[in-house]
């Protein structure tokens, strides 16, 4: 009766603490039967509790391992798609975007009339660039709201995360607002399409290179830590690669070129980091937005333009960015990367 089952060893062992004999439990020189029964019941309950605790721990470990594998699988799929995305971009860039339906590298739809190379965005008041700008401003506001609702807001590192994510979304939206403008006093006019970009290429590449470096620094910093040498060296290599690979596009496809190369970088980071910012929701949305990017480059006229054009890329991409905020990933309770 003094034996109890140890589920971790899968055998029976004698209890180290035999039942204590209380005063008055001796009856005629023998142990009380009630005393032995009570101790046996206690040992049985303790064995069940131990088994339940070990089973629960194993179940949680298995569940965590399964979620990690699903996460890496999602990032792996996203990485393969992003490499295909980059390949299609280089195929389109060789033809300088001819017959692709792209205007300055974007699939632009219009509410009243389709923007084209002749009129640009002058006549359709609502187009994909305007819609993308509105979406990006809204999602920037959502990011700010999540920062406000985060129960652990106020920490410098966490505030930097929200600031960086909001910056990525907002600067993307301002870019779309700029691309569809028809009048500017101090900046070159794109008007959705500009056949001659020779006067803005040098200035554009300086801005483009700076933005590429900052974007890479943010992505690698989130994944591996800003203080790591790999983050800085990788950002420099990434910037050089983007500028070199997009120089032969005539300037028109320079922005899609940035997106195409950012995708593999983000997916590579998500595949090898354990940071909660690169969670499965983000990976799934990256798969979707990469698929939208592929459709934009390969099937703008037939598939994407009739349903809104480039705006779907911004919706899916920046929903992924919003899903990486600490408020979503861990509800503000877990500590983010401290490096």
Image (spheres, rainbow, N blue to C red):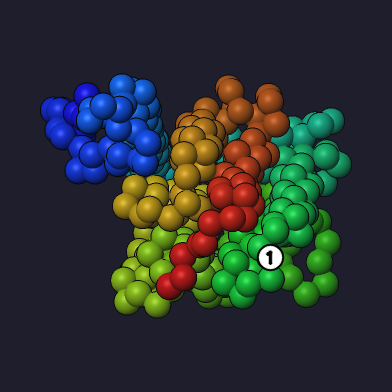
- For mark 1, what is the residue? 153
Please, is residue 153 above or below residue 69 in the view? below
Query: Residue 202, percent across and down?
Result: 53, 74
Compared to residue 236, the image places residue 267 above or below, namely above
Q: What is the number of callouts on the image?
A: 1
Residue drawn 65% across and 40% down? Answer: 315
Residue at the (75%, 55%) spot, across then down: 149
Placement of 68 over or under 6, stated as above or below: below
Residue 114's x, y, as percent? 74, 32
Where disc 1 sits, the SS reads loop
Q: Residue drawn 74% across and 70% down?
A: 187
Q: Is residue 4 left or right of residue 209?
A: left
Task: Residue at 78% x, 49% y: name it.
Answer: 138
User: How many neighbours does mark 1 have within 10 angstroms: few (below 14), some (14-19), or many (20 or more)?
Assistant: some
Q: Quadrant of the N terminus?
A: top left
| Residue 177 visible | no
- Name the residue nearer the viewer: 307 or 223: 223
Q: Is residue 156 visible?
A: yes
Q: Nearer the viewer, residue 238 or 295?
A: 238
Relative to 164, residue 76 above or below: above
Question: Which is more toward the observer, 97 or 266?
Answer: 266
Image position, residue 108 (x, y; %): 67, 39
Quadrant containing the C terminus in the rendered view: bottom left
Q: Nearer the viewer, residue 107 or 9?
A: 9
Q: Position of residue 229 (x, y in %)?
A: 32, 76
């Amino acid at each position: 009766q003094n034996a109890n089952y140890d589920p971790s060893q899968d055998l029976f062992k004698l209890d180290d603490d035999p039942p204590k004999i209380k005063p008055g439990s001796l009856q005629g020189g023998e142990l009380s039967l009630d005393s032995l029964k009570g101790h046996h019941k206690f040992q049985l309950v303790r064995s069940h509790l131990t088994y339940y605790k070990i089973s629960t721990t194993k179940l949680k470990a298995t569940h965590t391992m399964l979620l990690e594998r699903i996460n890496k699988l999602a990032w792996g799929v996203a990485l393969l798609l992003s490499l295909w995305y980059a390949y299609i971009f280089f195929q389109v860039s060789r033809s300088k975007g001819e017959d692709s339906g792209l205007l300055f590298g974007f699939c632009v739809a219009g509410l009243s009339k389709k923007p084209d190379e002749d009129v640009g965005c002058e006549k359709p008041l609502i187009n994909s660039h305007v819609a993308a700008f509105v979406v990006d401003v809204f999602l920037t506001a959502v990011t700010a709201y999540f920062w406000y609702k985060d129960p652990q807001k106020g920490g410098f590192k966490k505030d930097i995360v929200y600031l960086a994510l909001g910056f990525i979304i907002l600067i993307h939206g301002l870019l779309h607002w700029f691309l569809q403008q028809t009048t500017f006093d101090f900046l070159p006019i794109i008007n959705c399409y500009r056949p001659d970009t020779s006067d803005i290429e040098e200035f554009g590449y300086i801005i483009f290179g700076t933005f590429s470096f900052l974007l890479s620094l943010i992505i690698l910093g989130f994944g591996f830590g800003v203080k790591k040498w790999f983050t800085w060296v990788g950002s420099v290599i990434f910037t050089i690669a983007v500028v070199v690979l997009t120089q032969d596009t005539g300037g028109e496809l320079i922005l899609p070129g940035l997106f195409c190369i950012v995708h593999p970088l983000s997916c590579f980071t998500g595949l090898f980091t354990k940071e909660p910012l690169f969670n499965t929701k983000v990976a799934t949305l990256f798969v979707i937005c990469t698929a939208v990017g592929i459709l934009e480059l390969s099937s703008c006229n037939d598939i994407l333009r009739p349903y809104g054009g480039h705006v779907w890329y911004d919706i899916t991409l920046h929903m992924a960015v919003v899903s990486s905020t600490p408020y979503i990933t861990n509800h503000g309770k877990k500590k983010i990367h401290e490096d």
